[in-house]
């Protein structure tokens, strides 16, 4: 992130979730968890270096061109809110495509091969997925004239919620039930990581939970303690094998 306030807020948020996971864990972390976290951070560092640069580039390109659909009549704040909603729907659609198209699944599978979930899982993405997503994001950015600042703000909100919905925090059931009406919570997203393909192919939304309900991909089940996490029929790989996964499988 280029904005120091956004970066600072995000770092504090990650630290808070990391601490809460240790104070009130939902699941007991598996043996070798430290190595798993290091693997996730390794993939995350590669992705984190590339993602903001690609977003800035996308924003610069979009700012220099006349948008297909102008949102100027909504005012600055109104246009930005609509653009954030458009980016959330777009992210839903892309995530669904990563699951439904075998070529894209090769790049998304390293994220799903994680066999436990916590805040570090939110950073575990293959560089190939980051590059494909950035290239595809040019479509809404150019169509709706989304600038670099709005793209970065969306990315910060997305990352903050991804850290939360992957987290291994034990939340009061009633609080989470209410919260899940609006945003994606661990009880929703852990089902997306269930080691049963039918469940993996559901609950695609990243920020607002409404998109799965609208587009018919909401899984009525919610996270259970002890449920198997990962990809059905596969096991997690070493750092090098995860990087090579899309090309060799
Ligand atoms: Zn997925």
Image (cartoon, rainbow, N blue to C red):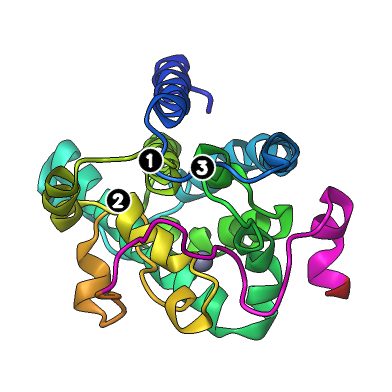
At 63% from the left and 48% from the top, the residue drawn is 124
> Mark 3 or mark 1, which has the lower sequence index?
3
Label 1 environment density (alpha carbons within 10 Å; few <14, some 14–19, many ≥20): many
Can residue 200 be seen in the rendering of this structure? yes
| Number of the front mark, 3 or 2 | 3
Q: Magenta span has 7?
A: no
Q: Position of residue 163 (x, y in %)?
A: 44, 40
Q: Which residue is mark 2?
A: 185
- How far is the residue under mark 3 from the one under mark 2? 19 Å
Q: Are marks 3 and 2 in contact (CB under 8 Å)?
A: no
> Mark 3 or mark 2, which has the lower sequence index?
3
- How far is the residue under mark 1 from the one under mark 2? 7 Å
Give the main secondary structure, helix, strand or loop, of the magenta stretch: loop
Q: Is residue 205 left or right of residue 33?
A: left
Q: Residue 190: which quarter of the image?
A: bottom left
Q: Position of residue 18 (x, y in %)?
A: 48, 27
In which quadrant will I find the C terminus?
bottom right
Label 2 environment density (alpha carbons within 10 Å; few <14, some 14–19, many ≥20): many
Nearer-the-camera pick, 68 or 6: 6
Q: Residue 188: which quarter of the image?
A: bottom left
Question: Which portion, as a residue range, is magenta?
Answer: 221-247
> Mark 1 or mark 2, which has the lower sequence index?
1
Q: Is residue 77 left or right of residue 98?
A: left
């Amino acid at each position: 992130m280029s904005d120091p306030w956004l970066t600072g807020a995000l770092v504090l948020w990650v630290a808070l979730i990391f601490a809460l996971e240790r104070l009130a864990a939902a699941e007991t972390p598996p043996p070798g968890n430290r190595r798993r976290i290091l693997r996730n951070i390794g993939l995350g560092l590669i992705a984190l270096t590339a993602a903001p640069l690609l977003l800035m580039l996308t924003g610069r390109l979009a700012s220099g061109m006349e948008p297909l659909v102008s949102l100027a009549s909504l005012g600055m704040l109104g246009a930005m809110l609509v653009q954030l909603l458009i980016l959330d729907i777009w992210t839903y659609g892309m995530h669904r495509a990563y699951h439904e198209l075998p070529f894209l699944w090769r790049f998304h599978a390293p994220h799903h091969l994680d066999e436990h979930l916590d805040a570090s899982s939110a950073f575990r993405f293959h560089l190939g997925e980051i590059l494909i997503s950035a290239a595809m994001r040019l479509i809404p950015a150019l169509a709706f004239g989304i600038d670099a600042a709005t793209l970065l703000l969306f990315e910060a909100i997305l990352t903050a919620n991804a850290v939360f919905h992957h987290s291994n925090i034990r939340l009061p059931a009633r609080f989470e039930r209410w919260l899940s009406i609006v945003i994606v919570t661990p009880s929703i997203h852990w089902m997306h990581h269930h080691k049963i393909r039918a469940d993996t192919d559901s609950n695609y939304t990243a920020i607002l939970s409404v998109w799965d309900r609208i587009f018919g991909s909401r899984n009525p089940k919610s996270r259970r303690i002890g449920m198997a996490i990962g990809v059905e029929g596969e096991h997690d790989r070493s750092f090098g094998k995860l990087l090579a996964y899309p090309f060799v499988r």
